[in-house]
Image (cartoon, helix red, strand yellow):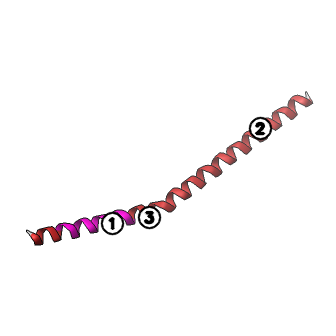
Amino acid sequence: MKKEQKKYEVQEYMAEKSSDKLEEQYYKTYMEWSYRQPQVEDQRLLVKDLLVENFELLSCLN
């Protein structure tokens, strides 16, 4: 019975540790993703500005 209890405690500990690692990986991935997001937004704004400028230049030529 004692061996069974110890086996259960070890399984419980490993499941908890695995869950903690999964949660840690999730937050790490989320932080990396959120760090890159503003750069993507800045790039979109830059492309939009370039397209507007390009359109204005083309309309001046016509």
Dot 2, how many residues are within 10 Å of its Cα: few (below 14), some (14-19), or many (20+)? few
Q: Residue furthest left?
A: 62
- The amino acid sitting under disc 2 is Glu
Mark 1 vs 2, N-terminal side? 2
**What element does badge 2 sit on?**
helix
Q: In this rendered view, identify the residue nearer to me: 46 or 23.
A: 46
Instruction: Name the residue: 59% across, 54% down.
Output: 27
Compute the Cα span from label 3 to label 1: 11 Å
Name the side, left or right, on which 33 lies relative to 9: left
Q: Are marks 3 and 1 in contact (CB under 8 Å)?
A: no
**Mark identifier at residue 38:** 3
From mark 1 to mark 2, how far is it between C-alphas? 50 Å
Could you say which disc has been placed on residue 31 in the image? none
* Residue 34 magenta: no
Instruction: Kindly give the residue lying farthest to the top in the view shown.
Output: 1
Q: Position of residue 53 (x, y in %)?
A: 22, 70
Magenta span main SS: helix
Q: Residue at x 10, y 71 (%)?
A: 61
Residue bearing the label numbered 2:
12
Please report contact status of discs 3 and 2: CB closer than 8 Å, yes or no. Answer: no
Residue type for callout 3: Pro
Crowding at label 3, few (<14), some or many (≥20) Cα neighbours within 10 Å? few
At mark 1, the secondary structure is helix
Q: Comparing marks 3 and 2, which lies closer to the viewer?
A: 3
User: Residue at horizontal 87%, vertical 28%?
Assistant: 4
Splitting the image into 4 quarters, where does residue 16 fall? top right
In this view, the residue farthest toward the right is 2
Find disc 1 in the rendering and name its residue: 45
Q: Which residues are magenta?
A: 42-55
x, y percentage for residue 14? Answer: 76, 40
Inspect the image, locate mark 1, and give the three-letter code of the amino acid beneath it: Leu
